[in-house]
Image (cartoon, helix red, strand yellow):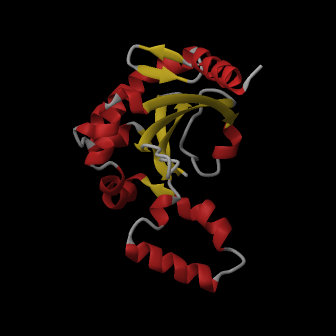
Amino acid sequence: MNQSTFIIIIYLTFICSTKGYGKYTFIEDTTTTKEFLSTWEMFSKAIISNDQTKFKELSLESIYCTDCVTNTTTEDSIFKNFENNNPNTWYEKLYDEFSYILIDRFLKEDYSLIFNSKIHKHIIDHKKVVFLHREIDGAMLLKNYSQVSFKNAVTNIQEVLLTHIEPTPQYEGSQIALQFIETKEGYKFFGYSTIP
C-alpha cells in the first residue's frame, strides 16, 4: 500500500467516526450529545447577545480557567512574582485553587476578554464548532463544586472545540475548548482552555 492510499484510508476512517447533526459535527454519536445540543444553543445565544444573566444560569458556581489567572498584563506580573517567590508550590496552586474562578468574578474580569467579537464569529460559523464527549469520575470534581448534584457517579462532559486560529503551513493553529458537565439541572458550563 502506498503512502497516498494509507492517508486516504486514515482520513475516511476519521470522517466515518464523526457524526453530523444538522449544522454541527460530533466526534461521537451518543444520546448525551444530542441532549447537550439544546444547552449549547442557549449558551451560544447568551454569548452572542451578551446575556450574562443567562450565561450565569447555564454555568457552575466557578469556572476552571487557567488562562484567567494571567490574561492581563497586571495579572501576569502578579503571578510571575508569586511564581518567583514560591518555586515549590506555584505550579500546583496555578492548576488547582487559582484556576477556579467564581462565576461573578469571571463575568466581571474575564468574560469580555474571552467572549469577544472574534469568538462570536467562530460560534456563528458552525464549521468551526466540534463537539467531543467524555466521561469522568464525578467524585474528582466534588471538592471544587460542593453545591453541584451530578446526574450520575460517572459524569458526562461535553467539550465544545472552536477553531480560533486556522492552521497554516507555518503555524498549527489554535482552538478554544469550552467544557460542560451534566448535572441534575442539565448541562452547565464549567471550564475554558486553549489548545495549544
Q: Is residue 54 visible?
A: no
Q: Which residue of the protein is positioned furthest toward the left in this rendering?
A: 49
Q: Is residue 90 left or right of residue 184?
A: right
Task: List x then y, in percent, for residue 89.
Answer: 69, 74
User: Which image quadrant is residue 29 in?
Assistant: top right
Q: Is residue 104 left or right of residue 179?
A: left
96 to 50, vertically: above or below: below
Q: Which residue of the protein is positioned furthest toward the bottom in this rendering?
A: 85
Report the residue at 44% width, 38% height from top: 162
Q: Is residue 9 visible?
A: yes
Q: Is residue 134 left or right of residue 186?
A: right
Question: Along the line of sight, which residue is nearer the eye, 65 or 132?
Answer: 132
Task: List x then y, in percent, for residue 195.
Answer: 54, 48
Labels in figure, total: 0
Report the residue at 59% width, 51% height from top: 144
Question: Along the line of sight, which residue is nearer the eye, 26 or 138?
Answer: 26
Task: List x then y, in percent, for residue 100.
Answer: 53, 57
Q: Is residue 89 left or right of residue 188?
A: right
Tell me the quadrant of the picture where the N terminus can be found.
top right
Question: Along the line of sight, which residue is nearer the eye, 105 or 67?
Answer: 67
Report the residue at 52% width, 76% height from top: 79
Question: Along the line of sight, which residue is nearer the eye, 28 or 60?
Answer: 28
User: Which image quadrant is residue 88 in?
Assistant: bottom right
67 to 192, vertically: above or below: below
Report the residue at 36% width, 27% height from top: 126
Task: List x then y, in percent, for residue 107.
Answer: 34, 54
